[in-house]
Image (spheres, rainbow, N blue to C red):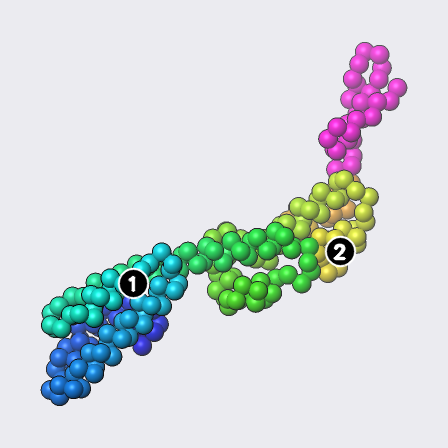
């Protein structure tokens, strides 16, 4: 059971007891032999599983070690060695898988954040993992949750549109993926500590500076390169 759960530390702790009690202390030779085969086959199944999850790991040497050993002391030693290797390789594959899944999720979010239907459930279904797995690993690797990541991208795009276009709030909300302008305003305020309307007003305000001795003024607008000269 502990092997099926990939709990190699617990399997390593129980290995000696299992081998002694169920294999070598069995008086009936045919039963002891069948149990030994069952133990070895369980180990081989687990080695094969780890090979499938970690493509950098080859289990051939591990399989050879436990398949050819017949003495109790030797079998115990080989089982411990193999379990130690499985623990190491499965740990590596788990970290690798987590990073790959999170990387894929982030890539999808960056491409599709404007889709109002994107979220934890749609991403989990697309990547073939559980909601809990994706949510936990994405936050561990990227430092923010999936919802926060989506909202950050939407707000940054909204700020760009507020500064550089004449789109109204409802149009911007729909463009960046919010289901309504009300939710857009609420989320925007959470991230920027001001409403989108206030942000737009602030970025469109200008500062008048005396530019020359001839009495001209420069009206400097926030859009780079956009400068109007008035007399």
Outermost right residue? 231
Residue position for label 2: 174
Q: Image check: 171 left or right of 78? A: right
Residue 32 shows up from this direction: yes
Which residue is more in the foreground, 22 or 66? 66
Q: Is residue 87 magenta?
A: no
Q: Quadrant of residue 88?
A: bottom left
Q: State the residue lying farthest toward the top.
A: 213
Marks 2 and 1: which is nearer the front?
A: 1
The magenta stretch spans residue 229: yes
Q: Nearer the viewer, residue 115 or 178?
A: 115
Q: Is residue 39 above or below residue 129?
A: below
Residue at the image position 22 percent from the left and 78 percent from the top: 37
Q: Position of residue 56 (x, y in %)?
A: 36, 56
Q: Residue at x 44, y 59 (%)?
A: 97
Residue 186 showing in the rendered view: no
Q: Nearer the viewer, residue 175 or 181?
A: 175
Side (left or right) of 92 relative to 133: left
Q: Secondary structure at mark 2?
A: helix
Q: Residues within 10 Å of mark 1 (few under 14, many from 20)?
A: some
Q: Write the residue at 84% across / 17% down.
A: 216
Residues in magenta, as a range: 202-231
Residue annotated with mark 1: 59
Question: Does dot 1 land on a helix, a strand or a loop?
Answer: loop
Q: Is residue 163 above or below residue 227?
A: below
Q: Earlier in the sequence, mark 2 or mark 1?
A: 1
* Image quarter in which the N terminus is found: bottom left
């Amino acid at each position: 059971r502990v092997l099926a759960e990939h709990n190699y530390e617990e399997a390593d702790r129980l290995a000696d007891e299992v081998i002694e009690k169920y294999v070598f202390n069995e008086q009936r030779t045919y039963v002891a032999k069948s149990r030994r085969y069952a133990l070895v086959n369980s180990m081989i199944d687990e080695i094969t599983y780890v090979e499938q999850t970690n493509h950098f790991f080859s289990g051939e040497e591990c399989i050879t070690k436990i398949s050819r050993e017949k003495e109790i002391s030797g079998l115990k030693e080989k089982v411990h060695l193999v379990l130690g290797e499985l623990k190491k390789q499965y740990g590596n594959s788990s970290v690798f898988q987590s990073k790959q899944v999170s990387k894929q999720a982030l890539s999808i979010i960056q491409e599709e954040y404007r889709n109002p239907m994107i979220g934890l459930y749609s991403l989990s279904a697309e990547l073939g993992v559980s909601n809990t797995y994706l949510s936990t690993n994405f936050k561990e690797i990227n430092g923010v949750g999936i919802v926060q990541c989506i909202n950050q991208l939407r707000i940054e795009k909204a700020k760009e549109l507020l500064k550089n276009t004449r789109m109204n709030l409802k149009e911007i909300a729909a463009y960046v993926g919010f289901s309504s302008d009300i939710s857009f305003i609420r989320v925007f305020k959470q991230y920027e500590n001001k409403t989108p309307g206030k942000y737009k007003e602030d970025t469109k305000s200008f500062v008048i500076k005396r530019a020359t001795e001839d009495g001209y003024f420069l009206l400097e607008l926030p859009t780079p390169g956009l400068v109007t000269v008035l007399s």
